[in-house]
Image (tube, rainbow, N blue to C red):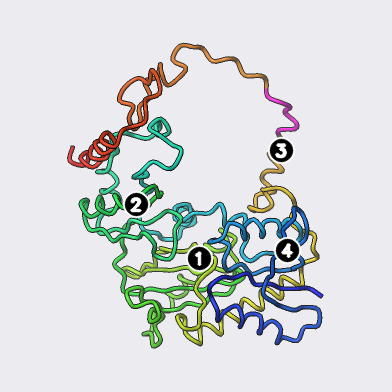
Amino acid sequence: MKKIGILFGQENTFPQAFVDKVNAMGLPEIEAEFVEIGPVKEAVPSGYSVIVDRISHDVPFYRAYLKNAVLTGTDVINNPFWWSADDKFFNYALAAKLGVAVPRTVIVPHFQMPPDTNDVSFRNQQFPYDWRSVFEYVGFPAFLKPHDGGGWKDVHHVHNPDDFFRAYHQSRDLCMTLQAAVKFREYFRCYVVGQREVRIMPYDPSRPHHERYVKNPPTYEPGLLERVERDALTLCRALGYDLNTVEFAVEDGVPYAIDFMNPAPDADVHSVGQENFDWIVDAVARLAVERAQANEGQGPELRWAALLGHEGELAGAAKKAAKKGPPPPKKAPAKKGAGAKEAGMKGPGLKGPAKKAPAKKTAAKKQAANASREESIEG
């Protein structure tokens, strides 16, 4: 008997419907249930052929449990290793490389220094920061939002530099992105399952949460919907997500992908509506059963390249390296001009040659430095 488990937290309607759907298929070799976790020991199998993950992004214990499960032969939807490494800014860069339209986006420096860092930690960062070039590239209006966040947390709609700095001062030590706003007429949220099935759902992010899925949408150009489906599949296949939602804001007929890192997307019947709910329950149940039937419990090849889909490239590189032999030992660098001291490296708090590490800034000096960052746009 192969077991399919679903790991979840506060949601209620989707997990039970998923389990009921799988068990209603009447497959004698497969059963579905809620995952139950006791003591987790290293390299000990979880007992599940497939686990659908709905909660590990919020609970590090679950993420560690799932990685151990993958190691011992469980197929986890979605890949917990890649999900741990992914972030939204990388997503935008990848989309641009793939030819999928995305709004102009930049990452911005932390407003507050992250824990266990000081001025010297940022010596590689340009100072004063060139805010003018950032604003000229992105333009206004724009959105300031975390580079790896979700659920519209810490998201600010800004219309000019003053708006930006007010929001920026509230960002604490988060790594943020500034992204051009899209003046959309149409907006779509797309479920993508198994990197092959797409359900395009008209969506209105300006409405209350439970009313955002448009129940009586207008007629759309077939070419627009075809491009939305194609781009959604392109993104999910490149990222390796088997369950995801991809959001597109359409301006002048161009669908811009603005949010596509949702590997545990909302599937509550009360927000998505009964028709969408039934589709996602059926699609994920079929995917999980297919994966369970194909899973022989061997687990992945124990190399990072296999997890990220580049095993062929790295294997070729390894063969070349083996033929060439080990590199010759490096010569010790000359003392002259060898370090930050001689090079006069500059960064936050380093206004000239770094003869010795500066002391941590006082609150007054930090405030002055932040003011200098803002004023640089005027210069």
Question: What residue sits right under mark 2 in the picture?
Answer: 171
Q: Residues within 10 Å of mark 2 (few under 14, many from 20)?
A: many
- CA–CA distance in space, label 1 to label 3: 35 Å
Q: Which residue is mark 3?
A: 318
Front residue of 64 and 322: 64
Q: Which of pointers 4 and 2 indicates the residue nearer the eye?
A: 2
Q: Is 325 part of what is drawn in magenta?
A: yes
Q: Which residue is mark 4?
A: 74
The magenta stretch is 321-327
Which one is in front in this view, the residue at disc 3 or the one at disc 2?
Answer: 2
Q: Residue at x 30, y 38 (%)?
A: 129
Pick whichever of labels 1 and 2 is earlier in the sequence: 2
Q: Quadrant of residue 379?
A: top left
Q: How far apart are the alpha carbons under marks 4 and 1?
A: 22 Å
Secondary structure under tag 1 reads loop
Asked if marks 1 and 2 touch (Cβ < 8 Å), the reply is: no
CA gap, disc 4 to disc 2? 38 Å
- Residue 155 horizontal/vertical position (percent): 35, 60
